[in-house]
Amino acid sequence: MSFSDFQWRNIDLNLLVAFAYLYRYESVSIAAEKSCVSQSAMSHSLARLRRLFDDALFERQGHKMCPTEHAHVLAPTINQILDSVTHDLLTTATFEPKAYRGVCRIGLTDYAEVIFAPLIYDVIRQQAPHAQVSFLNVNRSNYITLAEQEKLDVIIGSMPELHHSFHRTFLYTERHVCVADPEMIDIESGLSVEEFANIEHALVSPDGQLSTQVDKTLQHIGLSRKVTVATRNFLTVQFLLKQRRLIAIVPQKMAEIACYNNGLEHFSPPITVADFDISMLWFSRKEREDKNTWLRHLIQDAIVSLSKAK
């Protein structure tokens, strides 16, 4: 079908805007508020969208209007159309890092903040000397809400479940190691699984849970461990381990910092502990924004280079 043959009178660009807001917020009322129209107008737009695409598009599940499978298929194309209108038709100025005087808003997990905040600050300021950098602590349970509320440009951390509003790119794989005070625990010759299980454990727990997959692994071989303390903060663990008969399983990069600063030592766990991936996330709608594209490439190159160097 050619351009001239299509029945364009049936298409209203505002319907695509309404779809984008509904897809982003999964709520008719919030989508209406964010797009500055009444709730009835948004409901009317949804009805027109359903007729246009011959699909429910958004179905109520609890308090949310969840996208259907067809809506997930449509979303990338609709976002691309709106991005093209915004950036290709309506935007004339190009992004210049050297002249940028705004704020780069970066969401980081505890792990990512300790490991990468100085690096990210340095590489941004090198290319954008007038920019400000704002780091916000996020985790896998709140990153979606905070990214919207705080207008985050990118998020860095381990987020196994990716919300449909985001894109991501893999940065590197991290492994777990054990950390302990060698003056309190004899780790020079290594620990057997039984010795490992019989020593009290400190746990880094972003969600406050006092057990992990490690406990399930031990149960399979008829053992259990005693977790006597848990914290959400990686930094706290290194101080807990000093001068105490405690073991903690932490990411290797975090362990290297803890050992360097506090005279601790790290070693491989006597049981299998799964590796995890560190990724960078950003809203799909920001995919073609000049500033976001620059920031993503800058941070990715810096982090990947650092991980390969060590």
Image (cartoon, rainbow, N blue to C red):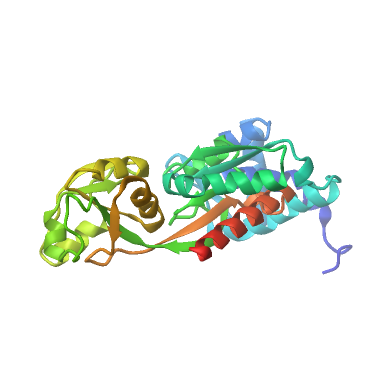
Residue 28 seen? no
Determine whether, in the image, residue 84 is placed left or right of residue 287: right
Q: In the rendered view, would you say 53 is above or below 113?
A: below
Determine whether, in the image, residue 101 is placed left or right of residue 135: right
Determine whether, in the image, residue 289 is placed left or right of residue 63: right
- Measuring from the top left, give residue 35's x and y in whole percent: 67, 35
| Residue at the (62%, 31%) spot, across then down | 33
**Which residue occupies the foreground of this view, 91 or 16?**
91
| Residue at the (27%, 45%) spot, across then down | 209
Question: Dividing the image into 4 quarters, which one contains the N terminus?
Answer: bottom right
Quick one: which residue is furthest to the bottom in this view? 1
Q: In the rendered view, would you say 146 is above or below 276?
A: above
Across the whole image, how many numbered discs are drawn on residues?
0
Residue 38 seen? yes
- Measuring from the top left, give residue 27's x and y in whole percent: 54, 39
**Which residue occupies the foreground of this view, 248 or 142?**
248
Q: In the rendered view, would you say 132 is above or below 186?
A: above
Q: In the rendered view, would you say 122 is above or below 280?
A: above
| Residue at the (57%, 62%) spot, across then down | 305
Residue 218: quadrant of the picture: bottom left
- Measuring from the top left, give residue 140's x and y in whole percent: 43, 47
- Measuring from the top left, give residue 39's x and y in whole percent: 61, 32
Quick one: which residue is furthest to the right in this view? 4
| Residue at the (66%, 52%) spot, across then down | 51
Determine whether, in the image, residue 201 is placed left or right of residue 27: left
